[in-house]
């Protein structure tokens, strides 16, 4: 029988439409995969009972001819999206145990279209990070981490239910364990989403991208991740980090799946003042494979010092693939790119310091008492926030303070405008832009934690488009010499996700990336 966890979403929809299997069967297979993937620490909250109930409703809807576009597909939800009645933590101790009474617009859209929730997945605390190492719930381990699957006998010494049985019926039972040779990060902040999709325990996952938090982890684990134009997906019900940058998007196994899921997630929302009232096109219809005559911009400023030769080589290979498909590469210039990272790490922390001021121990979340109100605030925030969040709050508070606002924050916003203007000028010469997604492959857990600047450089290729609010997608394009995935990034004009997806589909077909992570390959 076909391993249902190896199917793409579009393949699963076709199989269910033919009656080859049900959503309940598909969901059961993924629930088992979630359990088998616990060594990755990808999930903060598993919801198997809810998943099976939603799958049953999806089967009933299909039987009535009322199936939605995502009907019966089991997905994971980044734990930044509020889910009514289910814990939403943002990866932080300060929100541990918080169960919102409302649903985010994006997840509500997915449930409307029949998607099934497997659970809430791990992330860098408040989406602040590029490695998924800042989560209060521990780091996520990439399924690409080298290791071996071993089997041992376990019995009553494990405790729990077995330890309650009498000695006469305590029998050893086989337990599979993954023994890591080296633990790698899955990227961040959407590391749990990336790991869950790459490990084949969720068919897809929601992510959020503030400076590259969908695209960079997608590159690290060999999946597809698209950040739509700012305003395309509602931010209502998503725990805020930097409000002028945050944008939801799908993380999937194929470009076709990304087009399918994005169509469900998008749509105007009057509850979000930044949501754009614009019709959502049929993104899947754009996947024609015909890019003849399209001009592909190659920004000379993205050839950064120290970029590995194999990433440069893959970039050239991507240019050749698109040229062979009929596109025309043209050199472009984005002169203010060199200021993008510094600009981002002024604007984002400033908005973070404002957004996170609401976590004071008074209305919801963690509360640590003190001798007076001020001490209660201090105790709650000191215990509730991790080191990276505290660092960004302090930076943001500093650049917004009297005497520094004009010198830092206002100047950063002016540079941000110049960066957006660079893209406007570039798109007079080209239809899309091709770049590497990340400056390296995945690194080891703990490797860059002592150097925040080195960590921030992971987003050097993704941040400019975020500052300009542009759509971008990462497509797995090959393996580096260390056997780890590398991605290529396509950037497009505002609200032209259709063209971005069309070009991405051509790249995907040319790259033909189908290597399974060691963690999945070992499962068989």
Image: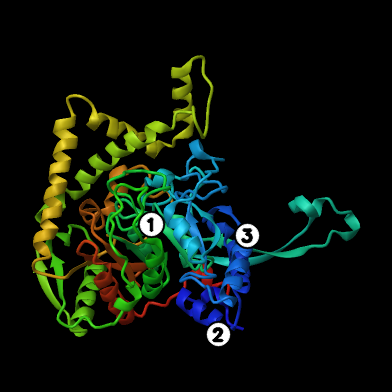
Q: Quadrant of the C terminus?
A: bottom right
The answer to whether residue 77 is visible is yes
Disc 2: CA contacts within 10 A as few (<14), some (14-19) or many (>=20): few
Residue sitting at 52 percent across and 76 percent down? Answer: 6
Residue 269 lies left or right of residue 192; in this view the side is left
Mark 1 vs 2, N-terminal side: 2
Q: Residue furthest top?
A: 371
Label annotation for residue 18: 2
Q: Nearer the viewer, mark 3 or mark 1?
A: 3
| Residue under label 1 | 443
Q: Nearer the viewer, mark 3 or mark 2?
A: 2
Q: Residue 231: x, y in percent?
A: 29, 54
Q: From mark 1 to mark 2, how far is it between C-alphas?
A: 43 Å
Q: Is residue 428 above or below residue 275?
A: below
Q: Secondary structure at mark 2?
A: loop
Mark 3 vs 1, N-terminal side: 3
Q: Residue 64: x, y in percent?
A: 58, 75
Residue 205 lies left or right of residue 273; in this view the side is right
Residue sitting at 59 percent across and 68 percent down? Answer: 27
| Residue under label 3 | 48
């Amino acid at each position: 029988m076909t391993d249902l966890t190896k199917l793409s979403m579009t393949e699963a929809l076709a199989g269910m439409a033919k009656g080859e299997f049900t959503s309940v069967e598909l969901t059961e297979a993924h629930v088992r995969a979630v359990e088998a993937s616990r060594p990755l620490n990808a999930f903060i909250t598993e919801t198997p009972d809810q998943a099976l109930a939603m799958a049953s409703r999806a089967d009933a809807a299909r039987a009535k001819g009322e199936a939605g576009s995502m009907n019966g597909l089991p997905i994971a939800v980044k734990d930044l999206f509020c889910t009514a009645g289910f814990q939403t933590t943002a990866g932080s101790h300060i929100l541990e145990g918080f169960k919102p009474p409302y649903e985010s617009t994006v997840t509500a859209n997915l449930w409307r279209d029949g998607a099934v929730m497997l659970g809430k997945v791990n992330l860098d605390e408040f989406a602040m990070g590029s490695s998924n190492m800042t989560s209060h719930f521990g780091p996520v381990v990439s399924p690409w981490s080298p290791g071996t699957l071993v089997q041992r006998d376990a019995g009553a010494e494990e405790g729990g239910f077995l330890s309650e049985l009498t000695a006469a019926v305590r029998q050893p039972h086989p337990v599979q364990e993954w023994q890591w040779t080296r633990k790698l990060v899955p990227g961040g902040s959407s590391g749990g989403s990336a790991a869950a999709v790459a490990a084949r325990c969720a068919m897809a996952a929601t992510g959020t991208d503030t400076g590259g938090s969908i695209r960079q982890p997608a590159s690290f684990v060999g999946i597809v991740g698209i950040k739509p134009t700012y305003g395309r997906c509602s931010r209502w019900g998503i725990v805020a980090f930097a409000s002028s940058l945050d944008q939801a998007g799908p993380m999937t196994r194929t470009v076709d799946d990304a087009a399918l899921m994005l169509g469900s997630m998008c749509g105007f929302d009057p509850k979000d003042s930044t949501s754009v009232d614009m019709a959502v096109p049929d993104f899947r219809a754009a996947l024609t494979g015909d890019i003849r005559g399209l001009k592909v911009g190659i920004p000379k400023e993205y050839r950064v010092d120290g970029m590995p030769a194999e990433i440069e080589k893959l970039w050239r290979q991507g240019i050749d693939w698109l040229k062979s498909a009929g596109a025309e590469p043209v050199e472009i210039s984005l002169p203010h790119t060199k200021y993008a990272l510094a600009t981002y790490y002024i604007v984002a922390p400033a908005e973070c310091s404002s957004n996170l001021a609401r976590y004071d121990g008074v209305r919801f979340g963690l509360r640590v008492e003190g001798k007076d109100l001020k001490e209660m605030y201090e105790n709650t925030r000191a215990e509730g926030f991790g080191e990276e969040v505290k660092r960004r709050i302090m930076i943001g508070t500093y650049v917004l303070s009297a005497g520094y606002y004009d010198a830092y924050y206002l100047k950063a916003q002016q540079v941000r405008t110049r960066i957006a203007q660079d893209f406007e000028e570039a798109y007079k010469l080209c239809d899309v832009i091709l770049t590497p997604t990340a400056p390296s492959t995945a690194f080891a857990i703990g490797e860059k934690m002592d150097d925040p600047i080195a960590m921030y450089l992971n987003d050097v290729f993704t941040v400019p488009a975020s500052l300009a609010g542009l759509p971008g997608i990462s497509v797995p394009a090959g393996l580096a010499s260390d056997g780890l995935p590398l991605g290529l990034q396509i950037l497009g004009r505002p609200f032209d996700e259709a063209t971005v997806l069309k070009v991405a589909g051509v790249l995907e077909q040319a790259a033909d990336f189908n290597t399974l992570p060691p963690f999945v390959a070992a499962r068989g």
